[in-house]
Image: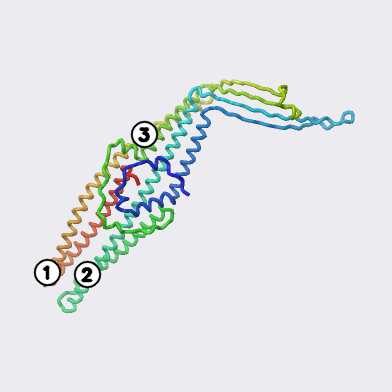
Amino acid sequence: MAEPAPDAVRQPLIPSALLVTYPVLRDLFAEVRVANAEREAAVARWAQAKALAEAANAQAGGLTVALSASANRSQASREVRGGLPTPVVTQTQVGATVGWDPDLFGKNRAAERAAALRAEAAEWDLARVERALLLEAARAYFEWLAAHERLTLNAAQREVVGRSQELIAARVAAGLASEREAMQVATLIAQLQAQRAQLLGRRAAAEERLALVTGGKRLPLSDASASAPLPVPVAADLPVDLVRRRPEVQLAERRLLAAIAEATRAEAARYPSLPLTGTLAWAAANPTAMWQMSAAAWALAANLTLTLFDGGRQASELDAALAAVREAAANYRQAVLAAVAEVEQAAAALASNDERRVALDAAAAAAERAWQLLSAQYAAGLVDYALVLEAQRTWLTAQEAAREALAQSRSDRLQWEYALGVNW
């Protein structure tokens, strides 16, 4: 059974338009969350960080209680004196020790906070890993869908060109067309066959990528939503909301705060400590007499400790912690800038490619109309077949370009939702 998702993954985000238009993505995403080994490893890292945070929290109070019990049986010598052996000595001891190391300079509190922040960072790292895997699954599905659509288009094109080939063959037999025209059509059919083989390879590669990201499972894929209109992109909001949603930014922030807490701990470790210890013990030769007041003993101790010389170890540890803070601060700034830049780039690509797709759709429609007109004129004997063939090639090229633009528009919407941190 999969681990429950952490709060960073379950957080409420803006809804996705892609999941509404392409419902198959929901099944793929659910399988990624259950079966992907990389996500499972991230869940394990999160669980480990949580356990270490709990251990640091338990240690922060500085209070320890230990119980001990022992029974000793000893004999000093086995030499006989006066015909009697040396007696065997038996002693039973029970004791309790209480220790308290007051956190005078905040070392334990800083260590506890650093561990808690590392646990939060592991939680956001899980969210980052999961979103990257979901993005990979969606990309693979859209690549499969694009190849599948292109194969359908390729089959329709081969059927159209096949009818042209039959027409040319009949005209060649009647002496109305040349062998050159027949070879030109045969060349076009061979090119379409080669394109089909390439598209089959692309579709198979996309299926393998999906199987990898879903833990080896091969889910049934559907192209039922292929003809659906492209979803309207979700609206962007303020950069501060973007920063709050992006797992990469939250991860970098938690790592920065954890580095600051670790530097605070390293600084506090250079100051004195004052551990207090109290011991209460009972010891007696006869266990029945052990609980008498005469068998009890107690002790209290205070131990002031200050390191005067350690070869520069503590100073070096503090320098390393401060350097880690500077590194984490730089990584945080870079994460924020990268998140904002990714949104800007995705928005620009989305707008430009949508405009390009509309133009290519119009070009494909115009090319198809031109080819149909020239085909009718050729059938009436008004134009040479070379013009028809050129128009047919232009139509095929325009159709393929329009399909590629459609696939790119889907990919742009996917990247846009990923950049905004949309809820998947």
- Mark 3 sits on what residue? 330
Residue 278 screen position, x and y as percent: 62, 23
Give whichever of discs 3 and 1 has the lower sequence position.
3
Give whichever of discs 2 and 3 has the lower sequence position.
2
- Mark 1 sits on what residue? 377
Q: Nearer the viewer, residue 365 or 47?
A: 47
Q: Residues within 10 Å of mark 3 (few under 14, many from 20)?
A: few
Q: Is residue 295 above or below residue 27?
A: above
Q: Secondary structure at mark 1?
A: helix
Q: Residues within 10 Å of mark 1 (few under 14, many from 20)?
A: some
- Residue type of the residue flagged with mark 1: Gln
Q: Tell me the quarter of the picture where residue 124 sits.
A: top left
Residue farthest bottom in this picture: 174
Question: According to the image, what is the colour scheme of the structure?
Answer: rainbow
Residue 307 screen position, x and y as percent: 54, 23
Give the residue drawn at x 64%, y 28%. Answer: 96
Q: Is residue 105 above or below residue 201?
A: above
